[in-house]
């Protein structure tokens, strides 16, 4: 990623190369949500992502996302908030879509749970 050039935005759902990984980390190239703010995305060489996993999960650290034309997902998936990570911009690949606004409050709640911030 070139500095001063915004090539991906917060809310984008993009393919991200997560390998190599260790242990229980989400593996392979998979759809991920860009959660880092756009100022950091523009000027930094890293971004913060959360992988989307197949299926539906009923857990306080998961946000279920229904497939739509807007988000570009092929089937319902869940954001695995516990797998939040920073990746180099070179790992960020093509755009699938954009996460709908109505999921953000659930994501913020899950982040507060995972990171131990008070609600």
Image (cartoon, rainbow, N blue to C red):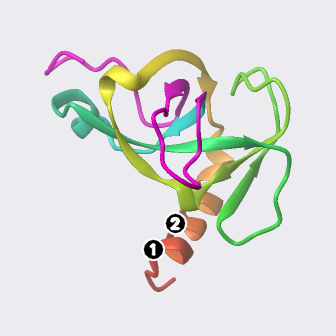
Q: Which mark is residue 115?
A: 1
Which residue is at a point 80% across and 27% down the rendered structure image?
68
Cα–Cα span, label 1 and label 2: 6 Å
Asked if residue 15 is among those painted magenta in the image, a careful observer would answer: yes
Q: What element carries label 2?
A: helix
Q: What is the quadrant of residue 23 in the picture?
A: bottom right
Q: Where is residue 30 in the image (x, y as percent from the top left)?
A: 62, 29
Left or right: 109, with 9 as reference point: right
**Which span is picked out in magenta?**
1-29
Q: In which quarter of the image is the N terminus?
A: top left
Residue 52, x across and y down, in percent: 66, 41
How many tags in the picture? 2
Q: Answer yes or no: do the residues labelled 1 and 2 have beta carbons within 8 Å?
A: yes
The residue to which callout 2 is attached is 111
Q: Position of residue 112 (x, y in %)?
A: 50, 73
Q: Residue at x 26, y 36 (%)?
A: 46
Q: Is residue 118 left or right of residue 96?
A: left
Q: Residues within 10 Å of mark 1 (few under 14, many from 20)?
A: few
Residue 77 sits in quarter? top right
The answer to which of 118 and 19 lies nearer the viewer is: 19
Q: How crowded is mark 2: few (under 14 residues within 10 Å), some or many (20 or more)?
A: many
* Residue 71 image offset from top left, x and y in percent: 69, 27
């Amino acid at each position: 990623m070139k500095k001063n050039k915004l090539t991906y935005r917060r809310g984008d759902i993009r393919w991200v190369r997560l390998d190599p990984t260790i242990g229980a980390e989400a593996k392979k190239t998979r759809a991920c949500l860009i959660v880092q703010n756009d100022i950091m995305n523009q000027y930094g060489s890293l971004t913060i992502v959360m992988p989307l996993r197949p299926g539906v999960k009923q857990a306080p650290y998961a946000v279920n996302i229904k497939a739509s034309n807007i988000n570009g997902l092929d089937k319902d998936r869940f954001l695995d908030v516990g797998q939040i990570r920073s990746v180099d911009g070179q790992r960020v690949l093509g755009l699938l879509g954009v996460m709908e606004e109505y999921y953000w409050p659930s994501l913020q709640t899950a982040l507060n749970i995972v990171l131990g911030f008070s609600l």
